[in-house]
Structure formats: structure tokens, C-alpha cells
Image (cartoon, helix red, strand yellow):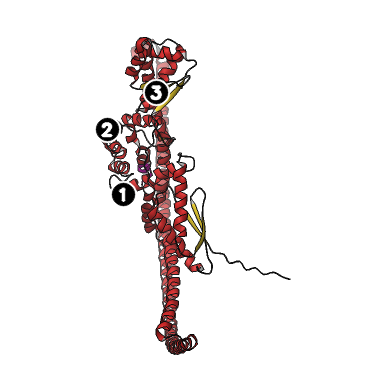
Amino acid sequence: MILLANIFPEGVAFALAGAAICFVFLWWKDRKTRQLQSAEAQSILEQARRNAENTVRDARLAANEEALRIREETDKSFAARRQERADLERRLSERESLINTQLEKIVQAEKSLQEQKEGLQKQDESLATIRQELERLTKQRRDELQRLSQLTEQEARGQFLKEIELEAVKDAANLSRRIIEDAKTRSEEKARQIVSVAIQRYAGEHTFETTTTTIALHGEDMKGRIIGRDGRNIRAFEAATGVTVLIDDTPNAVVLSGFDPVRREIAREAMARLILDGRIHPTRIEEVVAKVSQEMDETIVRLGEEAVHKAGLPPVHVEIVKLLGRLHFRHSYAQNVLDHSVEVAHLTGMMAAELGVDVALAKRAGLLHDIGKAISHEVEGPHALVGADFIKRFGETEAVVNGVASHHNEVAPVGPFGILVSAADAISASRPGARSENMATYLKRVEDLEKIALSFPGVEKCFAVQAGRELRVMVEPGRITDEQAYSLARNIALEIEEALQYPGQIKITVIREIRCVEVAK
């Protein structure tokens, strides 16, 4: 170094100066770093201290809030308990007041009962006195009657008993009227039974049926074309349709005869198409009859489904629908049987609603009640039983089956449906315009009504009005009193129910009239 220093004296000085500067710089930098680290540590400590203070402050605030919440809940609990206690004290006070009031009422009631007892005792004494006075007056009247009328005691007794009998009849009539009115207003179950039994009397039979159809022709030459050579056309038509073709001297007309209304309708439509087409021969006849038969099957199903829809019922088995559709081509006393069945379904449903029984089952029984008429010509037996057996095979309930089977009393009704169907059947058949009635039968019924009313004593005149649905009875006012008029009306109604068969119901009106006439001069 000395050698170097001797050689390079100025460089050594610069090196030493640089080293000194470097040392100072490093020292200053280290000091600065230590100061920065110290400041950072101080900042971290300060931040930690502030965080600790915040945490302590938050903890104190949370503790204070929890304490306040607990205090509020405690105060509320104490307030609720104080309120409950106050309510309990109030109820106890009210109950004590009520008990005191009831005790006062009981005391008052005992006092009132005692007063009533004393009053009843006085009334008993008064009634005993009145009874003794009545016995005395009765004996006096009996003696007076015997003296005035010169009657024996036995005769006077008979007259007296007759008066008592009249009074008893009057009291019995009033009592009967009150009992009936009370039963109508307050006894619902008894009323249901009375209605069910009463409406059962209105069931009727269906016997009339049209078996022929007349088709108009455009000319007499058409009869020959229908008959065909050696009658082959008419034989082919009868074989294809199953009906009989009657060709007689009636001008411009041919008659189709058959018991099956569906076959008769098929034959009528097929004959009309053949006449319109003009081509009549065996092959054409078979084609037309086959086409009409197919269309008829579709029509029958459609008619059955429409009937079920009109009755407001859910879908039924397709076989039942087919039979319902066949009823459209049957008539009873000029009344369409399918329309009649729908009407019976609605009537049965309305009566079932009034009685509080199942409306859907009642409508179902009403709609199906005459379904046996569609097959009764094929199966022997009453149509009610035949129809019941048929619908039973396709899953109908026992209630509906019995309602159908019993609506003409072939079997005993189980439940109300058979009676309701019977009543609805008679109502539908007997409404004005529903069926054609023989004039002689109608006049005979009206005549019998008037005869029954005239058979009672005291009846002066009687008239059947409203087509035999009302009977107006005029009585002699001197022989029939107002009280006896009620009994007379009831007795006439009972006699009519026992003696006559009639649709619907008959109203009996008894008229008692006194006319007082005076002439001023």
C-alpha cells in the first residue's frame, strides 16, 4: 500500500475519501432504516392500541345494550304479570258481582214462586167454587129443561149429551188442525216421510204404443215399383228391415208396421230415400237399408249422450247410452219416452234436493227408470225389472237399480229413490199437455169426484174445476158449521184417495156462505 501510496498518492486520498463517504452513507441509511422501522412499529402499536380500545368500547356498548334489552324484557314481563293480575282481580270481582246478582234473582224467583203458589191456591179455591156453581146451574138447567120441554130425564140427558158431542167434535177438529199445522212447521223428518208416502200414490202405468208409420207417395205408380216383379222388391225390403209393408187401397200412401220402433224408423227413412231416388230393386234396397242402419246407430248414441248431458250427469256406460237413445223413437200416450225420462230426472233431482238426499243418484235413477222399455219387447217381464237387471250388469249402484226396479211397485223400494222416481214419473205424465187422455175417462173421473162430495151430508152443490184438479164444495150453512167445514174437507180428501186413481193431486175447497138480505122500503 505504501508502495502504491508512494506511487499513486492522489488516488489513495480519493479512495479513502470515497470509503469514508460510503461508510457515512451506509451509516445514514442504516439509521434511517432503523428510524423507519421504529416509526412503523410505533404505528403498528398505536393501531393495535386503538383497535383494542375500539374493541373494548364495542364490548361495553354491546354489554350495555344487552343489559338494557334484558331490563326492558324484565319490565315488560313484570308489566304483563301485573296486567294479568289486574285482569284476574277484575274477573274475580265480576264473578263475585254475578254470583251476588244470581243470588238476588234466586231469592226473587223464590219469592215469585211463593206468590204464584199462593195465587194458584186461590185459583183452585175459586175453580172449586165455580165448579160447584156450574154443577148447580147444570142441575138447575136440567130441571128447567125437563119442566119446559116436558121431557123425561133420559130424554133431557140425550139432548145434553148431543150438545156435549158437538162441542167434542169441534174441539177434536181444532186439535186435529193444530196438530197438522204443527207437523208442517216443526217436524221436518215426519214431513219427509209423509211426502214420500203420499207421492207414491201417483205412479201410473204406460200401455199405449204406436206400431205403424204411414209414408206418403207421389203417385199410384210408385206402389207397383215398391212391390216389384212378383213382389220381389217388397220381400227384399221386409227381409232387410224386419218390418211389414202394407199396401192397400189408401191412395198415395203405404204403411209400415212393426213393434220395434228403431227398425220402423230405419224402414221409414230407407223407404223415403228409395222413393226419392226412384231406383228400387233388391240390391239397391239392401244398400240403402245398410247405410240407414249405420247412420241410425250413430244417431242413437248421439241422442243418448245428449240426454245424459241434459240431465246434468257424468258419462254412463256406452251400452246404457245406446238404450237411452233408442227411447227417442218410443212414445207413450203421444209423449216421447226419452224426453219424459230427462224430465223425470230433473223432477227427481229437485225433490231429492228438497228432502236432503243424494241429488246425483236421484237424477240417475230418474233418467234410467224407463230404459227397460227399449228392450221389453225382446225380454219378457215388466220394463222396470228388465231395465234394472240391465243397468245392474253395467255397474250401476244398488240404490239406482232399486229406484228403477221399484218405481212401479214391482219390488219394494229400499230408500227414497224408488218413491221419488214414481212420483216424478206421474208428475211428468200428468202435467197439462204431456199425454193424450181419453175423453170418456176424463168425464168419468170428474163425475166420480162430484158423486163422492155429494155423498156427504150437508153438501148442497159441488163442481169439479181446473180440469178435475180442484173440487169446490158448497155446503148448507145451517147444517155445517165453520169448524165442521174443515173436517168435511179432510174427509172428502180421504174418500177420494181411497176410491179413485188420478194423476197429480186434487184440491178440495169447502165453501160455507151465509147471505143476509133485507129490503129497505
> Taken as a whole, is the magenta stretch helix, strand or loop?
helix
Indicate the amino acid at tag 1.
Gly
Give the label, 3 or 1, closer to the camera: 3
Which residue is at a point 37% across and 52% down the rendered structure image? 196
Asked if the residue at tag 2 contacts the one at tag 3, i.e. Cβ–Cβ closer than 8 Å, the answer is: no
Residue farthest along the right direction in this orientation: 521
User: Residue 455, labelled with which disc?
Assistant: none
- Give the number of marks: 3
Spatial separation of the CA atoms under disc 2 and disc 1: 27 Å
Residue 379 is labelled as: 2
Residue 58 place in picture, x, y as percent: 42, 48
Determine which quarter of the picture holds residue 373: top left
On the rendered image, what quadrant is the C terminus found in? bottom right
In this view, 96 is above or below 476 = below
> The disc labelled 3 sits on which kind of residue?
Leu
Q: Are marks 2 and 1 in contact (CB under 8 Å)?
A: no
Q: Position of residue 238 (x, y in %)?
A: 34, 18
Above or below — where is 21 with respect to 420?
above
Residue 10 visible in this rendered orientation of the protein: no
SS at mark 3 in the image: strand
Magenta stretch bounds? 358-362
What residue is disc 1 on?
Answer: 415
Query: Is label 2 or label 1 in front?
Result: 2
Q: Is residue 462 above or below residue 178?
A: above
Q: Which mark is residue 256?
A: 3
Q: Amino acid at mark 2?
A: Val
**Label 3 vs label 1: CA separation?**
44 Å
- Say which label, 3 or 2, has the lower sequence index: 3
Q: Sort mark 3 into few (<14), some (14-19) or many (20+) by Cα contacts within 10 Å.
A: many
